[in-house]
Image: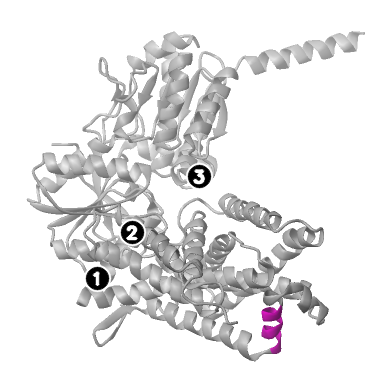
Amino acid sequence: MKLVAMLAAALIAVAAQAQDTIKIGVITDRVGVSKPYSEPATEGMVFGANEINKKGGVLGRRLELLVEDDQSKPDVSAALARKLIDQGAVFILSVSLSPATQQQQTVTMEAKTPQMTPMNSADYLTTQLDNPYFWQTGPLGSVQIATLLAHAKKQNLKRVALITDNSDLGQAIGKAFRGGLEKAAMQVVDEEVVPLGATSATPQMQKIRGANPDAMFVAGVVTATNVLIFKAYRELGLKFPIHASYNLSVPIYMTAAKGLVNGITFVDAYDPDKPEVKAFEATYRKETGKEPANLHGYGYDGIMLVAEAIKKAGSTDKEKIRAAMQSLTYGGVMGAKGMKYHFPEGKRTGFDPNGMVVRVYEGDRQGRVVHVGQQ
Amino acid sequence: MQDFFELAVGAAASGCVYGLIGLAYLLIIRPTGIINFAVGEWAMLAAFGGYVTLTKYEWPYPVGMAVVLGLMFVVGWATERVVVRRLVEGGAPLLAPILALLGMLVVFRESISVTFPPDPHPVPDAFGIGRLELGPIGGTYQSFFTIVTALGVFIGAWLFFERTVAGKAFEAVALNRRAAALMGIDLTRVTALSFGAGAVVAGLGGLLVAPNISAHYLMGVPLAIQGFTALVIGGVGRVAGPLLGGLLLALAEQLTVRYAPVPAGYAQGVPLVLLMVFLLLRPTGLLKAKV
């Protein structure tokens, strides 16, 4: 009888401990088109949660990540948001495709559950729906082009070409790039699209060569397609400079595009000389034995922001977390030196518009920062 | 004009890859009637094989290629043995193996997706990066290598079907399975060989295109669509059909992008519209089967 009582007590204790975690929902993509971005961001998030838990958790409770895979499918994604909320998630972190994140909002807005994407860059995520429970800390497409343009302005560009891919995000970033270029009074002399699955980008590059631009802007976000573009650029012996989207900040270019990327400038939200980055990279290497990249930093900052908001709220009450998040100021791994995430009154985009940097490929290596911000 | 010649070589190389994928379909369709949409994933498997043998372990190109293609034969044979044969012997309708192979498409893709990181994986060019100029015609070494290799495969396939007893057995099965069986042809062996050969040819297409598009877990489906389109344009009746279809498709794709006065983004739809018009005019494809 005594044994039964002890077992029951132990079970109750285990159950209480399990209930005592703070559940954070994570919607990622493990098999779809967003996987190259989502996977490292999720790894960064898991690493961050472990780090927080080692230091005693938040409000004395461990963070428990409930990770779901939406395959970048918006309909699946919305259903998963509902599932996570039903499982008790007090916050949802979205690191899947932008349209999937958008679809999740229909659920989080209705369920009044805080949701944030630390990585998505589509501008429409905070403009199409007035969802006070949603925040975006990934650098916006419009901020990327503004930063790239601020750097390009020094080179007195008049006539430029624009090339992108036909993915949802590639089109969205391309639109933001076009808007920025037109706003800066640069003439877009040719605009090309390389479809996913193409086996050559030579015809598009020939057209651009024919338009004789001062520079080419690459808004594409599909690495394999961008490699195709750079291959055609080199094969045709083209010389005009290339300015590229943040996709070029993915480290895989250093191996997948060997010999093709030297001299390309690209916008990034990651400064390897920033003290926070150095500390993050050293700890990540030590703990996991793997080399971190900027994408890990997005996930890491995401979970840190959520932890800060819950800490500031002093409770897991969703309404209190919402209020705390909206008034949060936090300096993380991402962004230029000294950048802090904050959400000005009425705004739900937290990445400082002057927080991006422009870097340059030196040989096959992602090299130094050559420009900071939009000035 | 310089642009046209530059494009012609690159488009011919792309067309040859589409043709090889189309031939992989054809090798299976003719004796079995089964459309195997997993051929694109076979191309992807071989591309990853190229990454492992040629990039990671830096084996000599011919050795890496031979090993990968050998393994592809095993993959094709095993697919038939494990997935298709049971259904055919169990009297399942033709749609059953087609559906099962669609399932295998997902299995192949996800196996790679969980085994390798999601980024594109580089595969080297057979003769390194460089250009060959032949008068006004110029292209990369890899483009010329792709064209020559694909032509070799198509000539080999033609000789096999036209000049060998085993090839005649394939033809006989294609014409009438029941009659071929009554003549003593081993249907099981022919079917298994057709899957093995289909996997080798699709794998070769994947290996040849991988230096351009990199080995990537999502590369299979576009290749499967392009190869199937090449097959439909060229016709299933003759070995040369997919090659001709592939060349036409690739030329239409690339010339449309380069010269058609349509906005960027719409150009990719033009070849498909042409395909629909073409099928309305010539539903059996360009080359008709021999009577």
Q: Residue furthest right?
A: A1
CA neighbours of label 1 inside 10 A, class few (<14), some (14 to 19), many (20+): some
Q: Quadrant of the C terminus of chain B?
A: bottom right
Q: Is residue B171 magenta?
A: yes
SS at circle 3: loop
- Residue A242 horizontal side relative to residue B170, left or right: left
Q: Amino acid at mark 1?
A: Leu
Tell us which disc is closer to us: 2 or 3.
2
Q: Amino acid at mark 3?
A: Gly
Name the mark on residue A256.
none
Q: Is residue B73 visible?
A: yes
Please report whichever mark, 1 or 3, sits nearer to the chain's N-terminal start.
3
CA neighbours of label 3 inside 10 A, class few (<14), some (14 to 19), many (20+): many
SS at circle 1: loop
List the residue tagged with mark 2.
Answer: B270
Residue at horizontal 29 percent and vertical 64 percent from the top: B256
Residue at horizontal 18 percent and vertical 58 percent from the top: A241
Q: Position of residue B149 (x, y in %)?
A: 48, 81
Tell which of B263 and A45 is nearer to you.
Answer: B263
* First to last magenta residue range: B165-172
Chain hosting mark 1: A
Q: Main secondary structure of the magenta part?
A: helix
Q: Are the residues under badges 1 and 3 in a single subunit?
A: yes
Name the mark on residue A236.
1
Name the mark on residue A32.
3
Chain hosting mark 3: A
Q: Is residue A359 magenta?
A: no
- Count of marks overlaid on the render: 3
